Structures are given as C-alpha cells and as structure tokens.
Image (cartoon, rainbow, N blue to C red):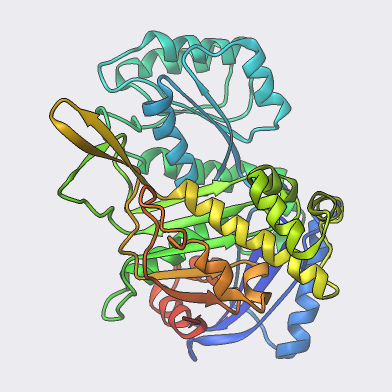
Amino acid sequence: MGNYLLIDFGSTFTKLCAINTEAEDLLGTASDFTTVDSDISIGYHKALNKLFKEIGNTIEFDQVIACSSAAGGLKMAAIGLVEELTVEAAKRVCLGAGAKVDLILSHHINKSEVKKIIEKKIDIILLAGGADGGNTECVLFNAEILGKMGIKIPIIFAGNKSVQDEIQDVFTKYEMDGYICDNVMPKINVLYIDSARDKIRDIFLKKIIEAKGIKRIENEIDQVILPTPNAVLEAAKLLSEGYLNESGYGDLVVVDIGGATTDMYSICNSTRRSDVLIHGLEEPFAKRTVEGDLGMRYSAPGIIKSLTKQEVEYINMEKEVDIEKEVNLRFNNVKSLPQNVHDEFIDQFLAEMCAYRAMHRHCGRIEEVFTPMGVVYNQIGKDLTEIKYIIGTGGVVINSKKQTKILARTTNILHNKAELRPSRPNLMVDQSYIMASMGLLSQKEPLIALKILKKYIKKIR
C-alpha cells in the first residue's frame, strides 16, 4: 500500500497517473509528447515535472510501473494455414496480447513475403497452422523458409502439436529465436489463446521494450509489465466483471481513439439468436480489434481512404474544406493540437469516422441466405446489440465538446439490420484518461483499480 506512479508510453503522448492506494484515489495526472525518436526520457521528464507541479514535489512513489505502445507498439506477423481459420486464430491471439498485427500471411509463404517481415520491422512472428493431428507439411515449410532467410526475431510456434519436435529441430538448425506453445486452434473452430498470449507478453517484457527505447530509463522504473492495449483490455475486463464484493458494469465496449490507431474492446458473450446459424471461429468473451489505418495523426490519411465518395462530399459541402489537405497537415505534424473552431470541427469529424469504422469492423453481421428450404440467417462475428455501456477514451474523445456524437457513431444509428452494433447503450467517458493506468494497477491492486475506474469514468448519456 502507498503511492503508485503509473506510466503509459503512448505512440503520441506519455501519460502519467499518480495513485494513493490508502485513499483509493487519484493524486493527479499529467502528459507530454512521447519522444521515442530522440530520447524517450525527455517526454517522460516533461510530463513528470507537470505532475509534480500539480501534486507537489515532496511525493515519493513506492512503485513505478509502466505500459508502452511507443515506436509503433508491439508489431506482429500472423502466419497460418487457412486464412479463415488458423490465420484468424493467430491474429486474435496477437490482438489479445496487446499487439498490432502488421502482416497476415497464409498457406506456403514465399521469399518476397519474408522480406516484408523484415521491411515492416516486425517484432514477433506467430506461426500457426493445422489442428492437432492435421496438416504438418505447410508449417514445416514455413518454418524452413524463415530459417533459410535468416530471420532472427522471436518466432512463436503455436500450431499442430504433432509437428512440435520437427519445428524445434528447425529452430535449432538455423539458430532461430524460437518458442513452442500450445496450438491456438487444437480443434476446428475452437480457440486456445492463453499459452501463446502469455509467451508474447513474456517476450515483450524481456526483449521488445529494450528496442523501444525504454531501456534508457529503466533505473527510474520498477517494471514495464504490459503493452498499452493489453493494459486497457485488463481494465475493461475488470470494469465489466467486478472484483470480490465490488460489482462491475456487465457487458461493455471500450473505444480508444489514438494518434496511430483506433482500438475497440468488447467484453461480453456474443448474443445467440434462436433463428440464426453461427459461422466461423467462436468469439472470445474479451475481444480486441485494432485499426491501424484509423488514427487522428499518424494514420489520419487512412480515415479518408476508408470513407465513401458520398461521405467525403458531405463533409466538404457542410464546411467547404479540403479534407485531404486537412488530414495531410495532421499526418505531417503529429504533435499538432486544435487551435481554433475549424481545427476542432475537423478533429471531431475524424474522431466520429474512427468510431464508426472501427465498430463496423469489430461487430458481427447477419447474412440472409436463400435456400430451397427458405431463408436462412447466418451470423458471422460477435453480436453486440445488447451491450449496456459504451466507454470512450483517448485524447480526442476526452477533449471533445461533443463526446456524445463520437460515441453514438458506434451504435446502430443508421438502422443497418445486417450489422450487430449496440442498439441502446449508455455512453460513458474515461474523462481522466486512466484506463491504461488502471489496467496496470489491476495487476497489483485490482480492487482499488476497480473503485477508481467506477469513480472517474463518467456517464454522459
């Protein structure tokens, strides 16, 4: 018990949160731009100075723990056998571990695809393929070509257990940094993510954080324990499920709109309608998706690319702006903040589109199929129609004067029957920007983290 300093080294901002566990409350928060391209300690110390001005410089911290998504976060490649099955299973493992999946490959990979792994500066490769007792040839081929091409970054094999020994031999033969985990899909359409997810986290803690520049201030930090998205996921799960006698909120969705990505988290079991057939992989209770082309600064051009021609025309008609020029200004100056009403309008629009598109990709859908026996309805993905709460976080949401409009974009406001979006949720905002910090604290003091989350996440509708 005592004072904690919780740090989130984000892609755009470094956020600090000071907690007193005896009072079960915040002492203060502060942030400054992340300076990973030069020296990550610069942005950290600027934020720390701001924090001490708020809470006083006599405060001492018993523990200093951090999470990080700096320098592009944890970038992974998912390699599997069939894109709809083992590749999708591998992708879900990566996302559940707090990674960003920058490359997805299937079947027999070739040299040009391996070169992409190098070009994209992938941090970890997750190699999967085949249910237990199934295909062995393809995963062996893929392991061999990775070895022949001299890949030295960590490779996790989480495929058919029948070929684990042979894969280990390949790792040894080519002196690869390889690890063997349980199969992510031991049976068709059945997921098992724990073993591979834990190994990803272990590699992140031991190796990746050094490459992200955090090694430079390790003497000031007790632990870096999670990738930032994983910390947010832990906070969302805690807030949903509760802890001991402290109740949670039940089914909820968190939308986190950042400078580089928009992350969506749904904590619930998928609703099962009696009149539909479920297709594809089973949906996890705690699901995360990340949209690398939907971000307010680094990925701003991707937002416009995701829009239809009619949507671009609409924004230009309403305000007579060159929207492509606006997003390029933000892309070329990632530290820019709104300076006037016009800037606020553009950021508001971009945030609304991030929320809308991210939910479009995250939620499930219903497909109507005509058969000789009549109409059949297939459900693909997670049914979120009965979600109780939508929680918004990220700088643009917290600072918006129209928070409700951003979060409402995640709901079924267009009445699209095919999309299984939330229908009538309560809207809430992480107004003090503490979700990642509380995810960190939940690893040490889950009850206190839950109480603080419930105190500071405010209902807006």
Name, please, the residue furthest toward the front. 317
- Total labels: the figure holds 0
Q: Which residue is at 64% across, 43% downward?
A: 208
Residue at (46%, 75%) from the top-left corner?
A: 427
Rendered image quadrant of residue 174? top right
Which residue is at the front of the view, 12 or 166? 12
Q: Tell me residue 97's x, y (percent).
A: 48, 47
Q: In the drawing, does residue 455 fall left or right of residue 7?
A: left
**Residue under the point 48% across and 63% down:** 254
* Residue 120 position (above or below residue 97): above
Task: Please state if 130 lies on the left or on the right of 118 as rendered.
Answer: left
Percent x, y for residue 8?
64, 64
Q: Is residue 82 above or below residue 52?
A: above
Task: Give how far across and how far down residue 190 sits, in percent.
Answer: 26, 35
Percent across and percent down for residue 290 are 55, 48
> In the picture shown, does residue 245 fall above or below 333?
below
In this orientation, does residue 97 appear? no
